[in-house]
Image (tube, grey):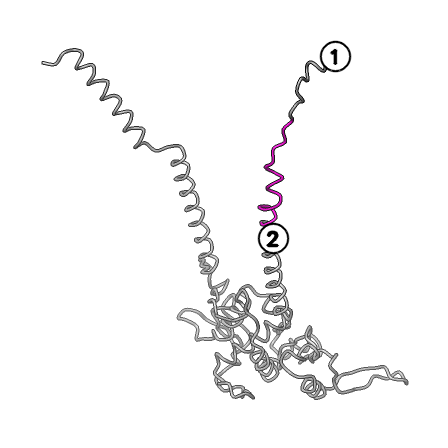
Amino acid sequence: MFSRGSFGAFKTAAQGASKRFSTQSGPSKGTMYNALMCVAASTATGAGLTLYYLEKNAASANMEAEGLHAPDYPFPQKKLFGTFDHASIRRGFQVFKEVCAACHSLDLVHWRNLVDVAYSEDEVRAMAEEFEYTDGPDDSGAMFERPGKLTDPIPRPYANEEAARAANAGALPPDLSLITKARHGGVDYIYALLTGYCDPPAGVEIREGLNYNPYFPGGAIAMAQNIFDGVVEFEDGTPNTASQITKDVVTFLNWAAEPELDDRKKIGAKALLLFSSLTLMALWIKRNRWQTLKTRKIAFNSPKNWSSKAKK
């Protein structure tokens, strides 16, 4: 059989091999740290994506009172570097004049704001002169009527709030100057609301004088559906379907609320280019200029025979 010395040598070799293999196969601290960081990053990413989905696809048990969440429509101005379609703004103003202006005001928009956006100065001046504005007083102290000017606001359909309520069964049509910023969902909500009229589902009763629209909070809205196929004839020959008409008037209302959007995005693009260039320049200076100063070594070499000179 085996001698005691042979058995001891075999045992020593086996223990060494066990340690060697266990060291190679066992995870190191760095590997465990990286795995934990990956798990944490995956958890945070999943939570963020879940919150984003819930924000874009809101659902609750009280959807009838809050209204349906509007879908995400592909308006070009919603993109990061997207701008307004100015032909659509021109058509949208035509829709506003012929359909919306019968009930809604646009107090914060003046005729001059349309110049070089959707119309030429002569076109806007001619449209303004079609309306009469009260001005004065004159030399005798009396007020007088005059044709509109570029500095005048878009005229109101009603003289005051009481007249507006009286003409709309007690409901006050809101001013549309900032409507796309004043409603949650912005242009998506306005588009969904204007195209979302339908018959109420079974079990839902709408009182007389109201209309059913699932996107409006409560489902009952005083404004009737006013946009249909062919309700407006566009000057440029664009198909006058209900969806196209709605898209154009929503684009116009978005411009009315944010007339600086194109300029703001243009300045933002310039700022990104500028700061990107400055960042690259700073990195180059850090690598090729500052790095040599940061990593240099300053050494002090004492003179020879320092101790002997000190004694003298």
Instruction: Return the disc, 1 or 2, that comes first in the chain's sequence.
Output: 2
Q: Position of residue 294 (x, y in %)?
A: 61, 38
Query: Looking at the image, is 239 positioned above or below residue 184?
Result: below
> Which residue, as the protein is rendered here, is positioned at the far left?
1
Image quadrant of residue 8?
Answer: top left
Query: Looking at the image, is 171 positioned above or below residue 95?
Result: above
Q: CA distance from mark 1 to mark 2?
A: 56 Å
Q: Position of residue 39 (x, y in %)?
A: 40, 43
Q: Residue 221 has which mark?
A: none
- Numbered marks: total: 2
Q: Residues within 10 Å of mark 1 (few under 14, many from 20)?
A: few
Q: Residues within 10 Å of mark 2 (few under 14, many from 20)?
A: few
Nearer to me, 253 or 262: 262
> Which residue, as the protein is rendered here, is positioned at the far right?
140
Question: Callout 1: helix, strand or loop?
Answer: loop
Query: Looking at the image, is 48 positioned above or below residue 73?
Result: above
Nearer to me, 13 or 303: 303
Q: Residue 281 has which mark?
A: 2
Question: Callout 2: helix, strand or loop?
Answer: helix
State which region is magenta: 284-300
The quadrant of the image that shows the N terminus is: top left
Q: Nearer the viewer, mark 1 or mark 2?
A: 1
Q: Are marks 1 and 2 in contact (CB under 8 Å)?
A: no
To which residue does mark 1 refer?
Answer: 312
Nearer to me, 8 or 156: 8
Q: Amino acid at mark 2?
A: Met
Residue 266 falls inside the magenta stretch: no
Main SS class of the magenta portion in the image: helix
